[in-house]
Amino acid sequence: MVDGVVRVTDLLDGHVVLDVQCLDRIYLNGYVPRLQVGGQVVTFMRDHLGYPIPSPAVMDRIGTSFRRAVDAFADDEHVPVVRFAKHDRTIEVMRRHVAAQARTGRSGVAAFGVAQEFQNVFASTGPERPGSPPWFSFYKADRRVTCFSFYLWDTDFGPAFVKVGSYLAYPLKVWVNGHEWVKQQARHAGLEFTELSNGFARCQDPQRLQEICARLGPADIQAFVDRWLERLPLPLTVADQAAGYWWELSMRQVETSRTLVFDAPRRARAFAQALVADNLDLGRPDTVELIFTGVRPASRRGRPIKHTQPCRTSVVTHATQVHVNAYVKHSRIKQYLKGGRALRIGTVVNCPGDLRLPPPAGPPRRAADQSPCHQQPAARY
């Protein structure tokens, strides 16, 4: 061992004042299982809504009604409306609105944003000849549509947002943060702690804090979504829900983390120096990558798992900040310093297939919808 190089075990031994494992950022898709193929759209319009001829005009009528409901909600609730520009960092734009709602101590919509975004929605084709009997067929396609992002402050979850597409089948996105949920639960329980950005720096009772972290599960998130879908304007109605046309949640991106808080910032700095030791990145470039093209993790049956992305590890240096990333397929494990005094180890899963989760039972998808892991439906949450 070269003198001056610090082992991880040396840093951890007796120098960690807080060790917390918690769900971090949770990003979910919402999809309507009964509106995933063209035939289901026909059934929805004809048998459920009562239109004798299923057509794009029906979709336009629902979308117009939804947009008017959003405008009325903003007026009635005095909610700020923000129109996002192309390169806006939406969370930065909305931060002050969410902070203002948080200061009230009440759950509420802080603001909502409006933007044109590409979404996987239904398009249609119709008669090609003038005078032909009216008929329409429906198929999935990526189209630029209006999306409404409702930025929330929730007394249980803290900051969150729900995004709704205005075009059938009304794709839904939900974002919550596990650390923020734990902070709210700790406050409700009277547990004292010191915040560290998206995490914790100190806590009077670390074991109790970890117990709260372990409580967060799918039922809590489902209850949060159900609660807000009752309050927000939506393109689907209570009658639609009663008939089985409602959203189910699936995983888009889920991040778990472990945070080790050192007793002194110099411990964190020593760890960073060990990461960028000269024998790894002579000259200190911005990025170093180790690529393992021949590595194929084995499945349960011992067969290699096929994937096009090579396994690789990278060390990224921005000024004095160092990030280590290990990539496998669509997911990664990242390791970095937080607030100059804590080591954050996060596992980011972008595809349920990486966890060998099966897809949900439901209607078959077209071949074009099979490969991208971010498209819904994915594994049910």
Image: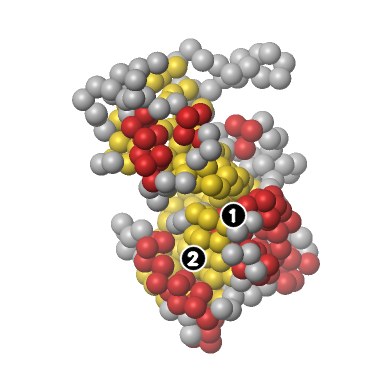
**Which residue is at 37% across, 66% downward?**
93
Left or right of residue 290: residue 121 = right
Q: Quadrant of residue 368?
A: top right
Find numbered disc 2 in the image and state the secondary structure of the residue it sits on: strand
Whether residue 132 can be seen here = no
Find numbered disc 1 in the image and state the secondary structure of the residue it sits on: helix
The CA distance from mark 2 to mark 1 is 20 Å
**Which residue is at 35% across, 17% downward?**
2
The colour scheme applied to this rendered structure is secondary structure
User: Which one is closest to the eye, mark 2 or mark 1?
Assistant: 1
The residue identified by callout 1 is 178
The residue identified by callout 2 is 149
Q: Is residue 312 above or below residue 77?
A: above
Q: Is residue 315 above or below residue 202?
A: above
Whether residue 182 can be seen here = yes
**Of 254 and 23, which appears nearest the observer?**
23
**Of 28 and 43, which appears nearest the observer?**
28
Residue 206 drawn at (x, y percent): 63, 52
**Which residue is at 56% across, 61% downward?**
193
Residue 130 drawn at (x, y percent): 49, 58
Which numbered disc, 2 or 1, marks the residue that appears first in the sequence?
A: 2
**Which residue is at 40% across, 72% downward?**
96
Q: Amino acid at mark 2?
A: Ser
Residue 62 drawn at (x, y percent): 58, 70
Residue 263 drawn at (x, y percent): 47, 46
Left or right of residue 289: residue 310 = right
Left or right of residue 237: residue 136 = left
Q: Quadrant of residue 268?
A: top left
**Of 202 and 181, which appears nearest the observer?**
202
Q: Are marks 2 and 1 in contact (CB under 8 Å)?
A: no
Q: Amino acid at mark 1?
A: Gly
